[in-house]
Image (cartoon, grey):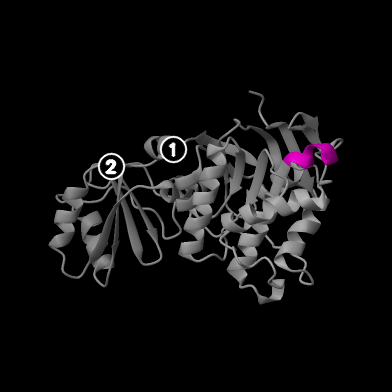
Amino acid sequence: MTSPLILRGLCKSYGGARVVDGLDLELEPGRCHGLLGPNGAGKTTTLRLALGLIGADAGTVDLLGYPMPEQAALARRKVGVVPQIDSLDPDFTVRENLLTYGRYFGMKGREIEARIPYLLEFSGLAGKADAPINNLSGGMKRRLTLARALVNDPDLIFLDEPTTGLDPQARHLIWQGLRRLIGQGKTLLLTTHFMDEAERLCDVISVLDQGRVIVRGSPRELIRQHIEPHVVEIFGDGLNEWKTCAISDPAAQRLSTLSSPAGGGGAGGEGFCRRCETAGETLFCYTDTPEIVVAELEAQPGLRYLHRPANLEDVFLKLTGRDLRD
C-alpha cells in the first residue's frame, strides 16, 4: 500500500535558524506513528509543512498522493487534524460546530447529521449535542475537538498533543477510540509529551531533535536498544552521603560513572549501576542487576527508592537530555 505521508529532505528555517533540517519520514498505512521530541525540536513545524500550511525551503512533501503545498486543498479532504489549541466556535452548540466544520469538506447536512451520534459516542459526549460550547468543561472541549477532526471520515489523522488537559478517565476513553480507528485501517500521526501515551498507542516512533530524526523504531525496540532494562530511583535525606561513600570507596565500587546534576551520565563501569544520572534530588540508577541495588538500599535506612522497568521516557531523556528546552 502507498504511504499516506512521505517527507524527503525537508528543510525549514526561521530568521536564519534551521528548524527542520533534512528530515525524512514515511508513514506506513494503518498504523499509529509517534513524532516525539523536546520543545523546539521541530515537531509543530513538521506538521505544518506536512499539511501544506507553510512551504519548505527544500525537500518534498507527498500527502495522500498530492504534492504539498501545491495541492493542499485536495489532500486535506481526507485528513483530520487535532491542533494543540482548540478552535471551537463559542457561539455554536456542539452539533452546530460539527455541522459547520463538515461543510468545509463539502459534506451535506444530512451526511454530517448521520455521523454526529458516532462522533459524540466516540468522544464521550453523548447527550451533549445541543449544549453551548461555553457550558462545556475544558476536557469536554478537547474531546469535541477530536470528534470534529473525524467528521469527514479521514484516512490520515494528525494528532498534536490530543489529550492535553484531560483527566485519566477521559484519556483512557480517547486511547480506546484511537485504537479503534487504527483497527479500522486509519493512519495516525501523533505528537505528545506523555511518554506512556506514545508507548501505549504507537506502532512506530520517530524521536526528533534539532530538526532531524535521531532514532526510529517500535517502543519495545527503542527501550531494548537504548536503555538498561531496570531503573532504581533513589532519594532521601541520606542520598548525598551515600553517593559520596559509593564513589569514594574503591572496595565497594557501588556506582559506575555519575553524571553532573544537569544530566548526561557516562557509560557503565564496574559498579552495580551501569549508568547513573542525578536530576534534582533524585539519583537514577540504570542497571541489569536491580536485586543487588535493592539489597544495598535496604541496608540504608536514610534512603527511599522506587524500582521499575525502564520505559520510553527513560529512552527519551537519554537521547535528548534532561535540560529544559524553551
Q: Quadrant of residue 95?
A: bottom right
Measuring 58% from the left and 35% from the top, which residue is drawn there?
185
Measuring 55% from the left and 47% from the top, which residue is drawn there?
178
Residue type pointed to by label 2: Gly
Q: Quadrant of the C terminus?
A: bottom right
Question: Does residue 300 appear left or right of residue 176 in this picture?
Answer: left
* Region rendered in magenta: 72-78
The answer to which of 201 and 18 lies nearer the viewer is 201
Q: Residues within 10 Å of mark 1 (few under 14, many from 20)?
A: many
Q: In the image, is residue 36 above or below residue 71?
A: below
Q: In the image, is residue 299 above or below residue 18?
A: below
Q: Position of residue 218 (x, y in %)?
A: 47, 36
Residue corresponding to mark 1: 222
Q: In the image, is residue 186 above or below residue 297?
A: above
| Disc 1 to disc 2, C-alpha distance | 22 Å
Measuring 31% from the left and 42% from the top, which residue is drawn there?
229
Image disc number at residue 269: 2
Q: Quadrant of residue 325?
A: bottom right
Question: Does residue 224 appear left or right of residue 100 in this picture?
Answer: left
Q: Position of residue 3 (x, y in %)?
A: 66, 28
Q: Position of residue 317 (x, y in %)?
A: 46, 50
